[in-house]
Image (cartoon, rainbow, N blue to C red):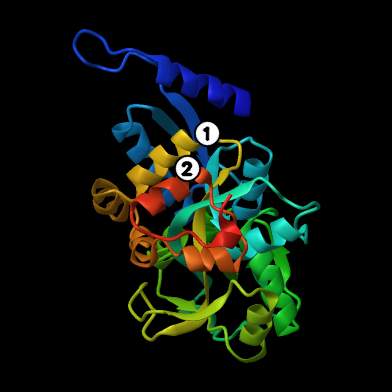
């Protein structure tokens, strides 16, 4: 990947302008990994791909479909995607080589915060299920293996001390399955609003199950990247009061070998006025990322080194890059 990108970047650097002043060189082509249809990540990073492709003279970005956040990190580490979703808790585990990762990941680099994500556990009000404990013996979708949903739902089940009838459905299929009565509950960590939860709520009012007591404590102990947060009342049809849950920062990350000029261009556009105007219209979750940006202290707290291209941008914006994450 590195040789191809450097070669493409060199073409841009060496290119000349046509008589009319337009760029003559072919743009560097990169990809961004962000889950699959039914997940907010697919929409969020699809918006970034659209922004970069529309506005950049030097970079063209495509959005690729994946099974979720675990696979995204693996793809970026392997150089099979240049950019993508980096969930804070998974970045910690990947860098340490902890499950669900089999080796230490050393190629992950931070760009900037994209969203604050909240963990949803959804049922229908008509089911009568109001607590995590009542999912014992029920049909629950953990989403596809390799997804953050699967990882977190497994943690939740263990913390609750229950055993469910596991299903492995993608988010859109799970929303259809719960509507058809083939599933009792499904989970998804997503910024608000989660597309699959919205889809399920079109059929009937839903319950979002609260994370509290030993379940909440168990999840908070699982990773320093998790923090307490609430899904506000009115977020979905049927959600009449705030629902306690856990949240975490979802970062845009890049492979360390992506040329600095390419990452600088993507970072610049992401956090430009045009980006700040356009991206929240694609998905409201972007607004939470913009509110906390650049969040370099939080990047430092999880030991995620910043990509030199992103570091250049944030320094130009007047921010100090913590020494432990500078390259």
Indicate the position of residue 147 as horizontal and vertical percent values.
Answer: 64, 55
> In which quadrant is the N terminus drawn?
top right
Q: Is residue 190 visible?
A: no
Q: Residue furthest left?
A: 20
For residue 309, which numbered disc appears in the image? Answer: 2
Q: CA distance from mark 1 to mark 2?
A: 8 Å
Q: Give the percent coordinates (x, y) of residue 112.
A: 45, 55
Crowd tier of the residue under label 1, counting other residues whose Cα lies within 10 Å: few below 14, some 14–19, many 20 or above: many
Residue of label 1: 259
The foreground one among 222 and 190 is 222
Does residue 273 show up? yes
Q: Is residue 293 left or right of residue 138?
A: left
- Ranked by sequence position, the earlier of labels 1 and 2 is 1
In this orientation, which residue lies closer to the viewer: 184 or 218? 218
Q: Is residue 193 left or right of residue 156?
A: left
Residue placed at 47% from the left, 80% from the top? Answer: 229
Write the residue at 34% across / 66% down: 291
Locate residue 300, reporting x and y percent.
Answer: 56, 65
Mark 1–mark 2 contact, CB under 8 Å? yes
In the image, 198 versus 316, the foreground residue is 316
Q: Judging from the image, what secondary structure is the residue with disc 1 in?
A: loop
Q: Quadrant of residue 246?
A: bottom right
């Amino acid at each position: 990947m590195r040789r191809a990108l450097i070669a493409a970047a060199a073409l841009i650097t060496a290119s000349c302008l046509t008589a009319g002043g337009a760029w003559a060189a072919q743009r560097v082509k990169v990809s961004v990994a962000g889950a699959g249809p039914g997940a907010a990540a697919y929409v969020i990073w699809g918006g970034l791909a659209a922004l970069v492709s529309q506005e950049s003279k030097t970079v063209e970005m495509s959005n690729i479909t994946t099974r979720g956040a675990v696979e995204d990190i693996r793809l970026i580490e392997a150089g099979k995607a240049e950019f993508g979703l980096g969930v804070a808790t998974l970045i910690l585990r990947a860098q340490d080589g902890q499950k669900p990762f089999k080796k230490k990941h050393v190629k992950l680099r931070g760009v900037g915060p994209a969203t604050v994500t909240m963990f949803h556990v959804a049922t229908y009000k008509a089911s009568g299920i109001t607590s995590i404990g009542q999912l014992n013996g029920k049909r629950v979708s953990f989403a596809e293996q390799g997804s953050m949903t699967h990882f977190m739902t497994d943690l939740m089940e263990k913390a609750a001390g229950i055993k469910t009838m596991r299903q492995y459905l993608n988010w859109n299929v799970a929303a259809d399955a719960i509507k058809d009565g083939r599933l009792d509950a499904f989970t998804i960590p997503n910024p608000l609003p989660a597309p699959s939860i919205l889809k399920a709520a079109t059929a009937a009012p839903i319950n979002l199950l609260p994370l509290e007591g030993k379940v909440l404590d168990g999840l908070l102990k699982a990773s320093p990247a998790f923090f307490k947060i609430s899904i506000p009342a009115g977020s979905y049809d049927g959600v009449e009061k705030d629902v306690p849950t856990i949240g975490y920062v979802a970062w845009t990350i890049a492979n360390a070998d992506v040329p600095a000029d390419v990452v600088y261009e993507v970072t610049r556009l992401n956090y430009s006025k045009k980006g700040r105007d356009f991206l929240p219209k694609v998905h409201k979750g972007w607004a939470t990322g913009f509110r906390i940006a650049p969040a370099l202290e939080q990047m430092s707290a999880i030991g995620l080194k910043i990509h030199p291209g992103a570091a250049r941008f944030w320094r130009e914006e007047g921010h100090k890059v913590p020494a432990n994450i500078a390259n």
